[in-house]
Image (spheres, grey):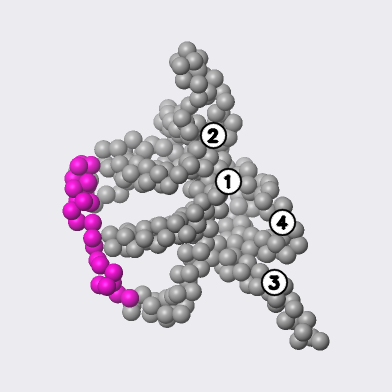
Amino acid sequence: PGPIGSFDWKLAGGAAAVYRLGWMLSQPWLWDADTVLLSVLALVIVMYGRPYIAQALRAVTFRKVQEPVAGFEVIIATLLGTLLAMAAQYQGSVVGKVPSKNDGGSFTDMAVNLAGGWVRQMPWEMPWAALMERLGGVIPALLSAAAFASVDFLGIVSVADNVPLGRELFGQGIGCLVSGVAGSAPVGGSLSRSLVAKMTGASSPVAGFVAGLATMALAAPALAGLLAPTPKAILAAVVLAAVLPSVVYPKDMMAFKGRSAIVGWSTTACTVLADPTKGFVAGLIVHILLHPSSLKLWSSKSA
């Protein structure tokens, strides 16, 4: 927390983010022109550039290639924006060098270390008592884990159609166990990442596997340097291109009526002003309160 403009804000979570967004949009004269131009360029290419890229590709290949691969517009936007930033000596925030404990290591060394020594601590060796104490006890820890897993799971499947939900939830749980053993962060889902995957044409769990392998490869020092000059504004614009249509006009939310609309918009408001976990819990409470069985119970008590 700290001063923004002349207002010493005391907000936290989503409410603080909403305030910062409103303050930023109301102060356009403070925007960095280069950052805005790169963001708009990437946004336009990703959202509207695919038909023109396809025409250019057909012309260059003499119609041997009719359609570019899925997500090709994202690659073009990132590459073009990075080249322009380098040519203009862009001074804004860039990806930069990836931190590494073994700067001199090769990708082969990383692969050998991963294959031979990935286990950091087995589940029965982990400090469960200290974890429970930090989270306030067993019950709060279980409730927090359940809420987090639910929100995370919904972030994965909410943009997919006709997916086996049980398999997805089971896979997420196994992934979290394996990542814990390896000393990594929990496996998580993200609505923005899921939307980007859907936007680029992903249609199976193989997309996540390929993305994981690509991330590991790009983390190698030899390849990570290629990403260093990429402006973060371009990457943010790619994510914005995936989520912006749903934010501007949430057609699924607009289709809700009656009790579903109250639950949906209550969840949305709490999520925006707090965080997804609190929004999920709030929506669940509103759903329970408005459920027909709860209304009947209240009616019988009042009678």
Q: Amino acid at mark 1?
A: Val
Residue 104 coordinates in the image, percent (x, y): 19, 43
Report the front residue among 197 and 294.
294
Q: Secondary structure at mark 1?
A: helix
Q: CA distance from mark 2 to mark 1?
A: 12 Å
Residue tagged 2: 46
Q: Residue at x 64, y 60 (%)?
A: 268
Q: CA distance from mark 3 to mark 1?
A: 31 Å
Q: Residue at x 38, y 80 (%)?
A: 133
Q: Secondary structure at mark 4?
A: loop
The quarter of the picture where residue 79 lies is top left
Q: Earlier in the sequence, mark 3 or mark 2?
A: 2
Q: Is residue 110 magenta?
A: yes
Asked if the residue at tag 4 contacts the one at tag 1, i.e. Cβ–Cβ closer than 8 Å, the answer is: no
Asked if the residue at tag 1 contacts the one at tag 3, i.e. Cβ–Cβ closer than 8 Å, the answer is: no
Residues drawn in magenta: 105-128
Q: CA distance from mark 1 to mark 4?
A: 20 Å
Q: Secondary structure at mark 2?
A: helix
Report the front residue among 178 and 190.
178
Q: Earlier in the sequence, mark 4 or mark 3?
A: 4
Q: Earlier in the sequence, mark 3 or mark 1?
A: 1
Q: Residues within 10 Å of mark 1 (few under 14, many from 20)?
A: some
Q: Amino acid at mark 3?
A: His
Residue tagged 1: 243
Residue 256, numbered label: 4
Q: Secondary structure at mark 3?
A: loop
Residue 62 coordinates in the image, percent (x, y): 47, 12
